[in-house]
Image (cartoon, rainbow, N blue to C red):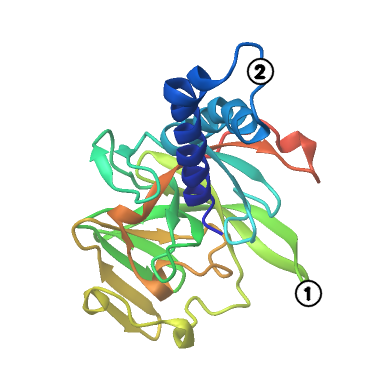
Amino acid sequence: MNFPLILFVLLVVTGIIYLLDYLFWSKSRAEGDSEPWWIEYPKSFFPIILIVFSLRSFVIEPFKIPSGSMIPTLLVGDFILVNKYTYGIRLPVINKKIMDVNEPQRGDVLVFRYPEDPSIDYIKRVIGIPGDTITYHNKQLIINGEVVRMEYEGDYKYVESGLGYIYADQFTEYLSDKNHSILINQDVKGMQYANVRQFEFRENCKYRRSGFTCEVPSGSYFTLGDNRDSSSDSRYWGFVPEENIVGKAFMIWWNFSDLSRIGLSID
């Protein structure tokens, strides 16, 4: 369901009725006559729809986390808020940027339209920006020839739907001037080569038995999930085009299963 498009259509329809009533229909009604329902309801809903549409399009949009690909940063069932203007002002529905503000940086938690199906929103961490060379070798991340430092935090256990408990090692990963937690499952191969698809700029990536190296093209970004061995990300379906960017995730505003997560910032 394309909710932004539905909201836009409702805004246009109610706005037209509101305007026509103001300009014409209200002047032809006898004094004291009540508005017909098909005028009253749209006029009542128009300001509400306008506010919601403006907030979702240009300021903040809520999302729900459906999978465990960003554990431990984000858990299944987290409801998050996404800053829509930090990477520039975009026209709603068509998502075309009309004003630059900032560019995504390494370490940002990015919400974007899935390149293989733009009707689906994905959330991953930005690992590579345009011009970067990203290498993933035996589960070690290397950016522009420099090994990304990791520090072991301890064991991590979580439940994956239909599989029971999953045991992994938790690390702190230091990316540029930021740090965040990631999970590494030592029982799973670092790359599932059968899942690598053909994608735009596929020639920028070289896959080997121990991992891969990708050069990030201009206007694109390379992303990974924090749950490294349980994430469908740029390793498999390629780069995120700039025009697919939705915004930057910055806060958890609700989780029905764990109220203590309410208000946590997303790093």
Find the distance from the CA under tag 1 to the CA under tag 2. 61 Å
Q: Residue at x 23, y 73 (%)?
A: 201
Q: Which residue occupies 56% across, 59% down?
A: 1
Q: Amino acid at mark 2?
A: Asp
State the SS at label 2. loop
- Looking at the rendered structure, the kind of residue marked 1 is Gly
Label 2 neighbourhood size at 10 Å, few (<14), some (14-19), many (20+)? few
Q: Nearer the viewer, residue 150 or 102?
A: 102
Packing grade of label 1 (10 A; few <14, some 14-19, many >=20) is few
Q: Which residue is mark 1?
A: 162
Residue at x-position 77% and y-position 75%: 163
From the top left corner, tell me how far across and down residue 242 is, in percent: 29, 53
Tell me residue 148's x, y (percent). 38, 55
Q: Earlier in the sequence, mark 1 or mark 2?
A: 2
Question: Is residue 109 at least partly visible in the picture?
Answer: yes
Residue, disc 2: 33
